[in-house]
Image (cartoon, rainbow, N blue to C red):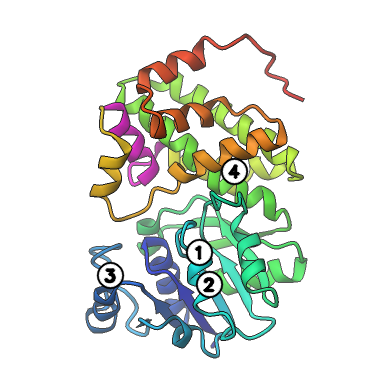
Amino acid sequence: MTTVAVLGAGSWGTTLADLLARKGERVRLWAYEPEVVESVNRRHENPVFLPGVPLAAGLVAEGDAREAVKGAEVLVSAAPSHALRAVLGRVTGAVRPGTLVVSATKGIETDTLALMSTVIGQVLPEARVAVISGPSFAAEVCQGQPTAVVAAAKDADTSRDAQRVFATSGFRVYSNQDVTGVELAGALKNVIAIAAGILDGLGLGHNPRAALITRGLAEITRLGVAMGADPLTFAGLAGMGDLVLTATGGPSRNRALGVALAKGESFETYRGAHRSVAEGANASLAGAALGERHGVELPITEQVCHVLFRGKPAREGVAELMTRELKSEQWR
């Protein structure tokens, strides 16, 4: 039995905590919200972020982050990207050197443009850091539906350790050493999913969606290669797999945001009405900034950013993408 601490009780953090508890690990889930702590411990459910899903009876919730990580051999980092640095700051000094810290957050820090593994390494420099990503709607994982993801770490042994921690008969985990590619794909597919939702909200059909997913993957790959990632990573689970799921699946929060934008709702109004985070909004800002830093053109990401933060009408953004200067598909 491994002692695991999960920091962040959103839908994905709760799902991973439940997965590991059902596997037989000793799991403590830290939640910021007192009502979530109470409900998980008393009723074995998280009605705020994962309603209607019965949780493992052995899963324990904690309101004190330092208590949650005490003695943990594995720490799963599942806080939203904008809060991750502050959340990890709560446990500095309480995490033992050499602890395996696995990031489950698909985002980019907007002010520093750091990937989540970098943030973890800066705040917890003595940790062994891995990331987990791939096509995995929380509700379907909780239902036990077959799911495949990837665990990545620069060190092969660390990657395999993370792989072994999470693997079950219904949750297949592949190992990888391309941390940059896996994280970048996981963050920026959310931006393309917002764009896919915009197409759906405008009533457009299958042709534009197929074009968007394909060209979206191309621009994510261009940026990834410029940042040192392996281009093959973007054809894998963290890339194409997660992009297809998030851009087409009904439960996708990012796709839902795009639909709302297309129907005229402002991002501020939408954000105020939804407690769960759509990571693609901040990722569009960070992605556009990374593209500028590395001299990589990201036309879809830039248009999503303009619709979200500059008030551009969604239909106008689609028209601008279609009337750009003609180019070769072979971008290298």
Q: Which secondary structure, mark 2?
A: helix
The first of marks 2 and 3 along the sequence is 3
Residue located beneath label 4 in the image: 239
- Rendered-image quadrant of the C terminus: top right
Separation of residues labelled 3 and 4 (CA atoms): 29 Å
Range of the magenta residues?
A: 248-263
Dots 1, 4 in contact, CB < 8 A: no
Question: At label 3, which amino acid type do we have?
Answer: Asn
Seen as rendered, the residue at the extreme bottom is 71
Answer few, some or many: residues within 10 Å of disc 1's Cα (few below 14, many 20 plus, some between 14 and 19).
many
Q: Which of marks 2 and 3 is in front?
A: 2
**Residue at disc 1, secondary structure:** helix
The label nearer to you, 3 versus 1, is 1
Q: What residue type is labelled 4?
A: Gly
Residue linked to disc 2: 88
Identify residue type, mark 1: Leu
Q: Which mark is residue 84?
A: 1
